Image (cartoon, rainbow, N blue to C red):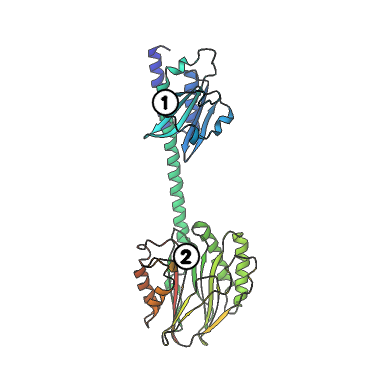
Amino acid sequence: MDRLKISKFKLDALLDITLSINANLPVEVLLAKYEKILRENLNIGKILIYKKSGTWECILNGGFSKKLEHIDVESKLLNITEITFDTADISFEGVDIIVPVFNNNVPIAYVFIGDIEEEGEGMSPVLKHLNFIQTFSSIIIVAIENIRLFKESLRQEALKKELELAARMQKMLIPDNSQMPKNPKIVANGFYFPHYEVGGDYYDCIRLSDTKTGFCIADVSGKGIAAAILMSNFQASFRALFTYDINLELLVNKLNSIVVVNAAGEKFITFFVARYDHETGLLEYINAAHNPPVIYDTVTGDVVHLNASCVGIGMLDDIPNVKKSELTIRNTSKIVCYTDGLSELKGDDGKDIGTRVIIKHISNTLPVEKNMREMIKELGLPDNNPYTFDDVSIIVADIPR
């Protein structure tokens, strides 16, 4: 090609590829155009491109051996900072020239060039146009990266919308305080803050009969979508099974069987469930490896922790020694159930707060809902505590006697 033809070719090539990019053509079409322009117009026999998109990958192989698609770029190519002729030090089979492509001084691609007409014109056609090849490659690689980033942003936006929907759906599973029992026999309230958009905490309070109220709190191991899905299934099962007369041991064993199947051994649930009889004051409960709820007697000032008595739901195929405990509430009392997102917050001493902050706030005759709000404010929940690394859920109840 004479100088005029060469200039026209380069301008036409740049215009063609620019129009193709602006037309939002697929990556496969852009690469096909790129390969055709270089191979047919510049007599390049072989082209291979490694591009970085998180990890290094071969995105085009035109004529090279398949084994060149599996080079360790980090160790073999990152030291190449300018157009390099293949030598014994590099020695990639069939490669004559390596063209690095940079964006903001960061390597984003490496182009391998080989000339199948090695005994013919040699490398002279390519040598004349190396700078053009580098510029042309840079344009196409940056365009492909922008396409990837655009698709990733769309995917992230779609995922964000799905998470927002999942969060709204999950909040529907957590009872609103307006739906919680509030009568002369029991007044319940809750607080729910997922660390991510969705979480693995759950609490509930259910009127089981005219004389009995049931409540629970649960925490799936781990966080995020998987935990939320398991918890939503657990909630449905719990609501279907929990009745005024079901044996609590049977309830726990049935829930365990369901979680074992659904979680396939990958997750488990710590769980506290209780049933309160308004007439007799009897509180029967099972704590399956959950943080011990706290009961405060407003008359005597006694504090009782309802400690765990068996392993968590889903830890074992069959839970050994499931046994309910009973406590008779004789005086007006308060109960606070919580997840470890609360108890594992750090105090000023750098240690887990445990239940000491709970006890500090409920040790009075004020409504426990007011105590909870003051405690949440002191702890800077949900947004002003740097030690919040987990979902935080609390369910409280005043039990008049």
Residue lying at the far front of the rendered structure: 89
Task: Tell me if label 1 and label 2 are in contact, CB under 8 Å.
Answer: no
Q: Residues within 10 Å of mark 1 (few under 14, many from 20)?
A: some
Q: Residues within 10 Å of mark 2 (few under 14, many from 20)?
A: few
Q: Could you say which quadrant of the image residue 326 lies in?
A: bottom right
| 219 is higher (above) or lower (below) than 322 | above
Q: Position of residue 395 (x, y in %)?
A: 45, 73
In this rendering, position of residue 126 left or right of residue 253: left
Instruction: Name the amino acid type tagged 2.
Output: Met
Q: Position of residue 107 (x, y in %)?
A: 42, 34
* Marks 1/2: CA–CA distance: 56 Å
- Quadrant containing the C terminus is bottom left
Identify the residue position indicated by label 1 in the image. Answer: 134
Instruction: Name the amino acid type tagged 1.
Output: Gln
Residue sitting nearer the eye, 225 or 8: 225
Considering the numbered disc 1 on the image, is that residue within a helix, a strand or a loop?
Answer: helix
Does the rendering let one see residue 22?
no
Q: Position of residue 270 (x, y in %)?
A: 54, 68
Residue depicted at 46% across the width and 16% down the height: 125
| 68 is higher (above) or lower (below) than 380 | above
Mark with earlier residue (1, 2):
1
Q: Position of residue 90 (x, y in %)?
A: 51, 27
Identify the residue position indicated by label 2 in the image. Answer: 172
Of circles 1 and 2, which is in front? 1
In this rendering, position of residue 377 left or right of residue 73: left
Q: Could you say which quadrant of the image residue 102 lies in?
A: top left
Considering the numbered disc 2 on the image, is that residue within a helix, a strand or a loop?
Answer: helix
Does the rendering let one see residue 305?
yes
